[in-house]
Image (cartoon, grey):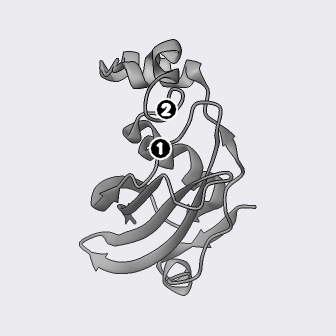
Amino acid sequence: MTVTVNGVDGLRERIGTPLPPSDWHLVTQEQVNQFADATGDHQWIHVDPERAKAGPFGGPIAHGYLTLSLASYFLPKVMQVEGFAMGVNYGLNKLRFPSPVPVGGNLRLNATIADVKDISGGVEVTVDMQFEVEGNDKPACVAQAVYRYYS
């Protein structure tokens, strides 16, 4: 389910109210390999399934930054922001990777608008994000992302 938020007032009304969770996304070895190619991070724990079987996680895991980058995939699926000329990713206030995402695992996003501040020409929106691995009690990624929306 996607929530449509209209303008500054719509964003402010959502502060503290969790957005619906995203659908599950299967993390594949192909996706991990493509991320490794794009970033140059070919550490064996990510790209060598045979060697990773003997590693600390019993198989290959996704890069932490691959998990975080999926915010760009997940967030528009849970929240559509209207009433602005454009929006940009402004950065992060906080980022942690408490547990790994196994290749072949399902991942989803849980998010809440934490704050909305006026800035010149628009608003700055802070979003608390938790990336959940199906069947795991601990989140794979906890982030506080900052977006800016301009009129």
Viewer-side residue, 142 vs 149: 142
Question: Residue at position x 41%, y 34% from top?
Answer: 63
- Count of numbered badges drawn on the protein: 2
Please identify the quadrant where the C terminus is shown: bottom left
Check if mark 2's residue and mark 1's residue have beta carbons within 8 Å: yes
Q: Secondary structure at mark 2?
A: loop
Query: Residue 12: horizontal and vertical position, in percent?
Result: 49, 84
Type of the residue with mark 1:
Pro
Q: Secondary structure at mark 1?
A: loop
The alpha-carbon separation of the residues under discs 2 and 1 comes to 6 Å
Query: Residue 119: horizontal and vertical position, in percent?
Result: 26, 74
Q: Which residue is mark 2?
A: 61
Question: Residue at position x 60%, y 76% from top?
Answer: 18
Q: Which residue is mark 1?
A: 100
Please identify the quadrant where the N terminus is shown: bottom right
Q: Is residue 4 above or below residue 15?
A: above
State whether residue 72 appears in this view.
yes
> Crowdedness of circle 2 by 10 Å Cα count: few (<14), some, many (20+)?
many
Query: Residue 118: horizontal and vertical position, in percent?
Result: 30, 79
Q: Is residue 138 above or below residue 124?
A: above
Query: Residue 38: horizontal and vertical position, in percent?
Result: 37, 20
Question: Residue at position x 67%, y 51% from top?
Answer: 134
State whether residue 34 appears in this view.
no
Question: Residue at position x 39%, y 15% from top?
Answer: 37
Extreme right residue here?
Answer: 1
Apparent side of residue 48 relative to residue 31 in the rendered image (left or right): left
Type of the residue with mark 2:
Ile
Of the numbered discs 2 and 1, the one sitting upstream in the chain is: 2
Apparent side of residue 58 relative to residue 114 in the rendered image (left or right): right
Q: Quadrant of residue 149?
A: bottom left
> Crowdedness of circle 1 by 10 Å Cα count: few (<14), some, many (20+)?
many
Viewer-side residue, 93 vs 61: 61
